[in-house]
Amino acid sequence: MVRRLVRQKGLSMKTPGPSELPASQERLLRERLQVSGYLADEDLSTTVWLASALQRPLLIEGDAGVGKTALATALAQSQNAPLVRLQCFEGLDLAQAAYEWNYGRQLMAIRLNESAPNGAGRVQEADVFNRDYLLERPLLRAISQAGPCVLLIDEIDRADEAFEAFLLEVLAEYQITVPEIGTIRASHIPQVILTSNGTRELSDALRRRCLYHYLDYPSLAREIAIVKAALPHADTRLVEDAVQFVQRLRREDLSKIPGIAETLDWVRALFQMQHSHLPEDMASVLGTLGCLLKTREDRFSMSAERLRQLVEGRRTVGVAENSNEQAKVAV
């Protein structure tokens, strides 16, 4: 009955396209990230797509080593766009982040002009304060790109609050004001990714200008998929054993929890040592823990007995077979 009425009215039973288009673009973005070596779940890829569609910065918080910086790198690769990176630190200022005048070149230009025969003209301020003498730092370089680019503002929580205040103009209007020459506006809006390890609280003004995503450590199935994608030649059992061990290790009382990069380093080291699974000899395992444990306290707190306890029961039936299905559920 409903279908007959629909046909009589000339209507379509199909859901309108606008709701399908964003979903297809989100899937396409996720596939491109995967081709670039980054496995993103649906929540993350949707947030990244929305940030791009709305031309808003994306703030990603999470512990060190969960893949925040790697996301920006993969995003740039997936778009075949340049990655401009600003590494934040305490004391970061305008000259290091945005621009600086090339005073040496300016002084040389003034002296050359003064030494010209017959006093070839007086140097005007506009002669030496223009774009030719401006040294572009990451922020200015990003908004000056002739095409799309990805701007990574890494570890923004390490910068001072005063730098955050300057950053607001860049993130709100995608422009930088240089007093000597005026305001420089972006011809192409860069896709901005800010990362934070949560070492200090960021200002409300900065958060309001950004979309937000919290990136946690991956589940067992997802981390197995990540390692297998990055190291396809490693034995499946070795990958399973190693990832399960690292997941247990993260629950220990450590001063620095190993991230995904440490997991990859460890599996790569075990593979180079021609192991097809975790060795039974705990001394061999202890010798490789420098890939996972990066502080003296963590390294020497891991005794052979505690290591054996973590390794015990490492094999879970069907982990390899179920990892893909679990990953799909997680996605």
Image (spheres, helix red, strand yellow):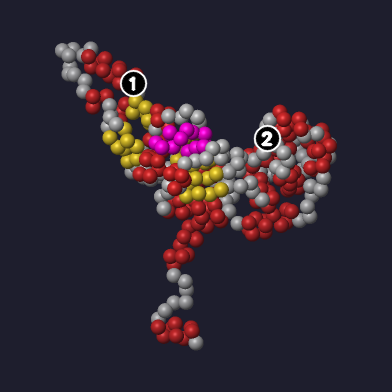
Q: Residues within 10 Å of mark 2 (few under 14, many from 20)?
A: few
The label number, if any, that marks residue 103 in the structure image: 1
Q: Find out whether residue 275 is within the magenta segment.
A: no
The amino acid type of the residue labelled 2 equals Ser
* Viewer-side residue, 205 vs 26: 205
Q: Would residue 117 be found to the left or right of residue 266 on screen?
A: left
State whether residue 101 appears in this view: yes
Where on the picture, by quarter, is residue 328? bottom right
Give the tally of numbered discs: 2
Q: Quadrant of the C terminus?
A: bottom right
> In the rendered image, which residue does mark 2 sit on?
255
The range drawn in magenta is: 153-166
**Residue at the (47%, 77%) spot, across then down:** 13
Query: In the picture shown, does residue 139 fall above or below 18?
Result: above
**Image coordinates for residue 166, horizontal then vertical, percent:** 39, 36
Looking at the rendered structure, the kind of residue marked 1 is: Tyr
Give the quadrant of residue 268.
top right
Q: Residue 167, image x and y in percent?
A: 41, 38
